[in-house]
Every structure is written in C-alpha cells, then in structure tokens.
C-alpha cells in the first residue's frame, strides 16, 4: 500500500515532483483508479489514460532510408578563400565570407538500408548530412561517404532501394534481388566497385569521408555561376573494415559507430573534417567523356583540384535522441543565397522527396521544431496552421494581414541581393532521354586500378560471395559488366563463379544501354 505521508517535501525528499503533461501533480504512479482494490477500472482515470495513450504514440514512422543514425552538433569555420583565391569571386554565400567566420552546425551520420536498431557494420553507404544554421537561413548539405551513387535519374530511386531493402515476402536482404537489379543497371558499376571494396564498411563514423555526390552551383555577386562538388575529409584519417573485422565488431555491438562518436565527443576529442570544393565552369564540358551532371562520376582531381574552404568541428552530443535525431530533417532543397541547384536529374528528384517525406514522417510543421528551425535567421511567413502548429508569427506590423501583397502593414518581398538572373541559358524540347555521355565503365575500371592489391582481393571475394547466391543468368551478366570494367576484375570474379569470358561472349549490350567508343572497344575484345 502507498504511504502518502512518506512522499513529497514533507518527507525531506526535495526532488522535483512528477506531473502529467497538463502540469497536474501525480500522486500515485503505481496504481490505476479502480472500484475497490480488486474492482473494475474507471474511465475518468485521466492520468492513466493519458500516460498509456501517449506511450501508444511514441513512435513516428522511421526514415524510409537512413533510419539509423547518430547526431552531433558543433560549428563550421570558413577559411574565407577557395584555395588561394578570395571565395567571393565564386560565391556570395555569407557563411563562406571572411576567414574564421563561424556557423553552427548539426550533423547526422547514418547507415541506409537497415532499421533503427540495425547493425552499423553493414556493407552499406553511410549518410553524411550537415545542417548549417546560417544568418541567411539554413543550408543542408546531404551527402554520403562514397563519392558516387547507383543511379543517375531520380525516377529509379524507389527501385534501387526496393532491391536493396529486405524481400517483401521473406523480409531478408537477398543478394539475388540486389544483383538482379544491378545487372540491369550498368551505371551502378562504379558505385558497386566502391561499395564491395573495404570502403563499403567504414570502421566508424569519425574515420570516413563525406561527399555531396550531386553537382551544385555557386553564384557570385555578379550572378556568375560555377558547377561545384563538395568533399569532407576527416582529420583523423579514413579507416575501413573487411567482412572479418566487421563480423567481430558486430558480434559485440550493433551500434559501435554511434558509441564511438558519442564517447569521443564526451572525452573532448572533438571530431573534425575539412570541407573541400571542386569547381568547373557552368557548361556542358564537351571535352570530358562524362557529363558533369552525372552523379555516377567523379571529377578527376588533377583537372579539377579539390580546394579547402573551411573546417567543421563537433563539440556536443544530443541531449535527447528523439527530438534531435528522429525529428531532425535534412533536404537538398535547403540552400542559401549564393548556393544553387544544378540540373543534375538526381538532385531535382531528391529536392522534392525530402520535404515531402518529412511532412509525412514528422508532420507539416516539422520546420517549427527547435532542431530544424532556421535559428540564426528571422523566419516570417504567411504560411500558417496545420497539425501541431506551435506558433503563427506572420511578423508584419499588422497581425490581421497574413497575405501578400498588401499596403496594410503585412510582409513584403525581399530585394535580390544582386542579380536575379544567373547561369547559362537552357533550351530544349520536352523529352525523356538519358544524358548522352553515359560512359558507365571507365571510372569504375580506374577505381579498380587505383586500389591496393589487398583491396582488390577483398572486393573480388565480396563480389563472389554475394553473386554466388544469384541465378546463373544474373551471374553471367555481372561477369560481363565486370569484364567491361576491367579484365582482371571480370576474370577473377568469373573464376570464382565458374564463368569464363567464353560463357558471356554471346551476351549483347542491354537494350537500355548506350555504348561509348571506349565501351565498343572493350566489347570487341570480349568477343
Ligand atoms: C535520406 C530520398 C539519393 C543521402 C533520405 C530520405 C529520403 C531520401 C526520402 C529520408 C529523409 C527523412 O525521412 O528525413 C532520396 C531520393 C534520392 C536520394 C529520392 C534519389 C533520387 C540520395 C543520395 C544521397 C542521399 C544520392 C547522397 C548524396 C541521404 C542522407 C539521408 C537521406 C544522408 C539521411 C538524412 C538524415 O540523416 O536525416 N533520402 N535520396 N540520398 N538521403 Fe537520400
């Protein structure tokens, strides 16, 4: 039986008193109200019903991808220059202006395919999403730890993710489904050569790179634009795991990467990354054998050097997982003045997808949550209402005027800082076409050639282990692709699967494929 007299301040216990969410003190948190000690419960039992019904709603939908992640906070410090040149020559974005200028950041590092409690040792890309709380509003740079992606058109994203996610019947991630899709998707070869190498299992979150992957633009005060790609380099170096390393870590802990990041920050060992930017003029670059808007390609660093523009330091862990991790929302549409989109067909699709999923996953007012608010800029909007609206603050002189234009004291449009027209003029007919320079194998082959021998051995072993679980037709097509990537890769994976070049020489290019001149040469060698 509860001894009422022994509780509360009278007993000398000066801990704060538990209340319900209406602020009413809770006198008994152990027993429901019933008719007699053994009788039926009553329906006016507000505290009990409120407690249980809130518990019933504790979860929101997990992210459809990147469900498991770790969040931390810190700052970005600008170098004020792109290499040796003043940065305002290329971008007017305020966060980059001036050496030593600091901007608050939040970062979320994640795995992609598994659920919220899945293993952080999975062979999987890692998400690398950074939110900059700038004075001009937020900027989100939503990237991955690998520099390229599986596909180049956003319309294929649901398919690639369905193939990588668990089977809709067995609920197991099935190699035969993954490689069935990939064997019909030649543009994925570059990503696969990265993902199945040791880089596909980073040792933890602190020792991995980040890449914007998609192509963006910088805009200067004159309205001139350049195409850019973003890279994050960890100060403590890059480390990866083989399958054997990963199996050992996973046997002890499914969340070792979250733990490592959290503990490093608690120890005061603040993780740091440098931000580097590659740049090229804003045009089609016919001299290149790839399209700069193709996210299955990297830009060769000897032609387009990656120059440092600043550094990011993480200094604080989350104080609450749900409100700062589950509810944080990043998106590629979240850009500030001086930074812009390119016509990269993945980027435009992503830009629709993020805010769309967040309205569903978190709610239409997700931007009012503290972690998502543009906390270093004033937000004044005539958008209002919706579920869980926390405030409506039109911000004009006249609270009645929640529309624009008005001469009655409402909000007005901003003036463009400088030019309102920018970038090259684009003309074309509406169409559904692949970009012309697909060149699906060259960079995959270059990546393989650049690997150290142990990395190649690991890559070949991982491919054989996964693809051996597929149908013969899928295996043959994958060997055919690998022979197009690099003879040595194709021969070695083929040997492991019992498939020689003669077994695949009858295969024709896929109907969906445009072969480049290089590809044609490789194909004739194959025959
Ligand atoms: C998360 C869509 C490609 C990086 C997500 C989410 C969606 C999505 C719906 C869940 C967001 C949320 O619930 O808050 C897409 C689509 C893509 C695409 C449609 C292609 C068309 C990419 C690429 C990258 C990437 C190429 C890397 C450059 C991320 C990251 C997250 C994420 C890092 C997790 C953000 C977080 O930590 O909250 N994506 N994605 N995605 N995506 Fe993508």
Image (cartoon, rainbow, N blue to C red):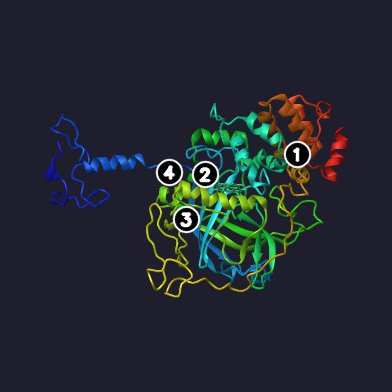
Q: Which mark is residue 229?
A: none
Q: Is the distance from the Cβ of mark 1 to the nearest ligand 1 atom less than 8 Å?
A: no
How crowded pointer 2 is (Cα within 10 Å; few <14, some 14-19, many 20+) is rated as many
Mark 4 closeness class: few <14, some 14–19, many ≥20 residues within 10 Å: few
Judging by the rendered image, the residue that carries numbered circle 1 is 512
Q: Earlier in the sequence, mark 2 or mark 1?
A: 2
Q: Nearer the viewer, mark 4 or mark 2?
A: 4
**Label 2 residue near ligand 1, CB within 8 Å:** no
**Distance of label 4 from label 3 (alpha carbons):** 33 Å
Q: Nearer the viewer, mark 2 or mark 1?
A: 1
Element type at mark 2: helix
Task: Measure the C-alpha gap from mark 2 to mark 1.
Answer: 39 Å
Q: Residue 339's x, y, as percent?
A: 61, 63
Q: Does the image show residue 262? A: no
Res 447 quadrant in image: top right
Which circle marks residue 257 in the picture?
2
What SS does tag 3 mark?
Answer: loop
Q: Earlier in the sequence, mark 4 or mark 2?
A: 4
Callouts 3 and 2 close, C-beta under 8 Å:
no
Q: Earlier in the sequence, mark 4 or mark 3?
A: 4
Whichever of callouts 1 and 4 sits on the residue coming sooner in the sequence is 4
Q: Residues within 10 Å of mark 3 (few under 14, many from 20)?
A: few
Q: Reply above or below: 319 against 42.
A: below
Q: In the rendered view, does 373 fall on the left or right side of 96?
A: left
Residue where numbered disc 3 is placed: 268
């Amino acid at each position: 039986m509860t001894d009422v007299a022994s509780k509360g301040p009278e007993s000398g216990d000066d801990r704060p008193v538990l209340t319900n969410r209406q602020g009413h003190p809770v006198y008994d948190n152990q027993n429901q109200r019933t008719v007699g000690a053994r009788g039926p419960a009553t329906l006016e039992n507000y505290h009990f019903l409120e407690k249980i019904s809130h518990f019933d709603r504790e979860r929101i939908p997990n992210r459809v991808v990147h469900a498991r992640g770790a969040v931390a906070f810190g700052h970005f410090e600008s170098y004020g220059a792109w290499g040796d040149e003043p940065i305002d020559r290329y971008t007017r974005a305020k966060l980059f202006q001036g050496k030593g200028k600091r901007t608050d950041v939040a970062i979320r590092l994640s795995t992609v395919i598994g659920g919220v409690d899945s293993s952080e040792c999975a062979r999987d890309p890692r998400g690398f999403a950074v939110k900059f709380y700038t004075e001009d509003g937020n900027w989100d740079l939503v990237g991955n730890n690998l520099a390229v992606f599986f596909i180049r058109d956003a319309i294929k994203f649901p398919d690639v993710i369905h193939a990588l996610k668990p089977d809709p019947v067995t609920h197991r991630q099935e190699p035969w489904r993954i490689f069935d899709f990939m064997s019909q998707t030649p543009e994925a070869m570059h990503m696969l050569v990265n993902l199945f190498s040791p880089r596909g299992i980073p040792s933890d979150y602190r020792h991995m790179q980040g890449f914007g992957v998609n192509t963006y633009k910088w805009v200067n005060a004159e309205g001139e634009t350049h195409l850019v790609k973003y890279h994050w380099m960890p100060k403590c170096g890059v480390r990866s795991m083989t399958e054997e390393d990963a199996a050992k870590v996973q046997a002890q802990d499914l969340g070792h990467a979250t733990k490592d990041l959290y503990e490093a920050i608690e120890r005061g060992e603040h993780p740091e990354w440098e931000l580097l930017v590659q740049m090229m003029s804003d045009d089609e670059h016919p001299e290149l054998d790839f399209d700069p808007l193709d996210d299955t390609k990297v830009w060769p660093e000897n032609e387009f050097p990656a120059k440092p523009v600043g550094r990011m330091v993480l200094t604080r862990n989350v104080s609450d997982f749900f409100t700062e991790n589950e509810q944080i929302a990043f998106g590629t549409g979240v850009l500030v003045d001086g930074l812009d989109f390119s016509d990269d067909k993945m980027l435009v699709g992503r830009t629709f997808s993020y805010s769309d999923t967040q309205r569903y996953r978190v709610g239409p007012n997700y931007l009012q949550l503290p972690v998502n608010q543009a906390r270093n800029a004033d937000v004044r909007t005539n958008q209002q209402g919706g579920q869980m609206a926390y405030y409506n603050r039109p911000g004009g002189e006249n609270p009645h005027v929640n529309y624009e234009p008005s001469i009655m004291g409402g909000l007005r449009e901003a003036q463009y800082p400088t030019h309102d027209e920018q970038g090259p003029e684009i003309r074309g007919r509406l169409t559904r076409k692949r970009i012309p320079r697909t060149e699906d194998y060259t960079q995959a082959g270059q990546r393989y050639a650049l690997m150290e021998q142990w990395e190649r051995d690991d890559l070949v072993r991982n491919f054989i282990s996964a693809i051996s679980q597929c149908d013969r037709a899928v295996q043959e097509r994958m060997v055919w692709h690998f022979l197009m990537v690099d003879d040595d890769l194709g021969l070695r994976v083929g040997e492991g699967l019992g498939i020689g070049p003669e077994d695949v020489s009858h295969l024709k290019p896929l109907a969906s494929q445009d072969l480049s001149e290089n590809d044609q040469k490789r194909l004739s060698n194959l025959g």
